[in-house]
Amino acid sequence: MSTAAARHQRLHAELRSRICLLDYPPGTRLSETALAEEFGTSRTPLRRVLARLEDEGLVESRHGVGTLVTDVDLARMEQVYGLRLHLAELVGRLDPAPVTAEVLAGIADHVARGTALVASPDARSFAQLNMDYHGFGLSLTDNLPLRATAERLYFLTARIWLQSIPRMDLASECAIFLSEMQDTAAALATGDTEAAAAIRRTHIAMSVTRMAR
């Protein structure tokens, strides 16, 4: 990857993360001038990143106003979650990646972070771990179109959890998440990526049910 492409990826990932962690809540105006100064870049590459985020549904450009962070379309989210359930299962079946020592070390690291989170629950830390764990899950397939589609849909829904947490039991959610990662670690220890994907699908469905209460 070229240096320019790498910078684009890093800037896109950082702004997307800020949106999904609600550092930039819905309605926030993203100043091109301020962001260009913060990241030490010109407006041209920044505008390309903002255009990508708009294509992904995370921001919108309004004439005479600027670039604003979008709100979550709850009606659309139901359809997105439905599709995510099917894609989660496909991760274990389409071009599964080999379960290497690196993969096992990765899941062990996530379990360790989850254990620490259960000991000291924190909503933002939960959301960050969830994002990181999603990326780890996608690494279990070598099917690049599947990874790209699943990633895009995930980030469309990522803000839902943080917006829902005031009416949920954070400690319980952290414990459930840790259980998922432990079950996944056990499946991967036997090289069973299909079982790991099925675990992910089940927990996505359960989380949707809990958030809907």
Image (tube, rainbow, N blue to C red):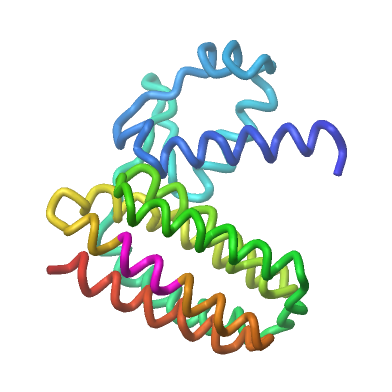
Q: Is residue 172 above or below residue 189?
A: above
Q: How many marks?
A: 0
Q: Nearer the viewer, residue 146 or 126?
A: 126
The answer to if 116 sits in the magenta stretch is no
Residue 118 is situated, as x and y percent measured from the top left of the image, at: 33, 56
Is residue 1 found left or right of 23 in the rendered image? Answer: right
The answer to if 177 sits in the magenta stretch is yes
**Magenta part mainly helix, strand or loop?**
helix
Tell me the residue at 73%/77% (across/down): 99
Tell me the residue at 59%/11% (across/down): 37
Tell me the residue at 46%/18% (across/down): 31
Stretch in magenta = 174-180
Is residue 195 found left or right of 161 in the rendered image? Answer: right
Name the quadrant of the N terminus.
Answer: top right
Name the quadrant of the C terminus.
Answer: bottom left
Is residue 93 found left or right of 73 in the rendered image? Answer: right
Residue 189 is situated, as x and y percent measured from the top left of the image, at: 64, 82
**Quarter occupied by residue 211:** bottom left
Q: Is residue 13 above or below residue 177?
A: above
**Quarter occupied by residue 150:** bottom right
Tell me the residue at 87%/38% (across/down): 2
Q: Nearer the viewer, residue 97 or 43?
A: 97
